[in-house]
Amino acid sequence: QAWLVESGGGSVQAGGSLKLSCHAPGITHNTNCMGWFRQAPGKGRDEVATIYFGDGSTYLPDSVKGRFTISPDNAMNTISLQMNSLKPEDTGMYYCAAQSLDRYECNSDRWSPIYWGQGTQVSVSS
């Protein structure tokens, strides 16, 4: 059984929107930090958004701030990523991640997650 399962990827034109979802069938305890990473072809995996469930605080890098929103869903260990005004450079495989962390580790660009999903592809054409 996979730790995390992503859904909602697809192909859109620049300026379009997509919503990704992630749930954690393989994790039976509460994790207080979840997030999204993406990996473009031939590049490393970059952090896109994180959320700390303890207080709802989030972290998004400047490259997606104002366009992407991460939010919790009703079920335990479930999140969504709303992506608006998509750009071709947003293309990549998007991975969901989870771990129990403190707020400062979660809402940083230095998180190295323990639990990963298989990924969902997002393709944005110009």
Image (tube, rainbow, N blue to C red):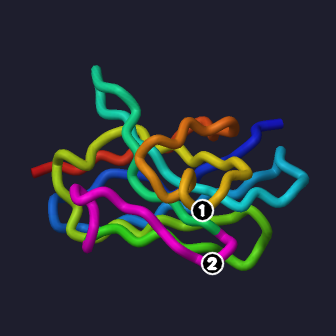
Residue positioned most to the left: 126
Looking at the image, which residue is at 27% across and 44% down? 91
Q: Is residue 91 above or below residue 59?
A: above
Which label belongs to residue 123? none
Q: Which is nearer the eye, 107 or 115?
A: 107
Residue at horizontal 68 percent and vertical 36 percent from the top: 114
Element type where label 2 sits in the image: loop
Q: Which residue is mark 2?
A: 55
Q: Which residue is mark 1?
A: 103
Q: Residues within 10 Å of mark 1 (few under 14, many from 20)?
A: some
Image side of residue 77 versus residue 102, left or right: right
Mark 1 and 2 residues: CB-CB less than 8 Å, in contact? yes
Amino acid identity at mark 2: Asp
Establish if 31 lies above or below 42: below
Point out residue 73 in the picture as x, y percentages from the top left corner: 66, 75
**Residue reaching furthest to the right:** 28
Element class at badge 1: helix
> Quick one: label 2, few (<14), some, or many (20+) residues within 10 Å?
few
Give left or right: position of 46 versus 35: left
Residue at (22%, 56%) from the top-left corner?
63
Magenta residues span 53-66
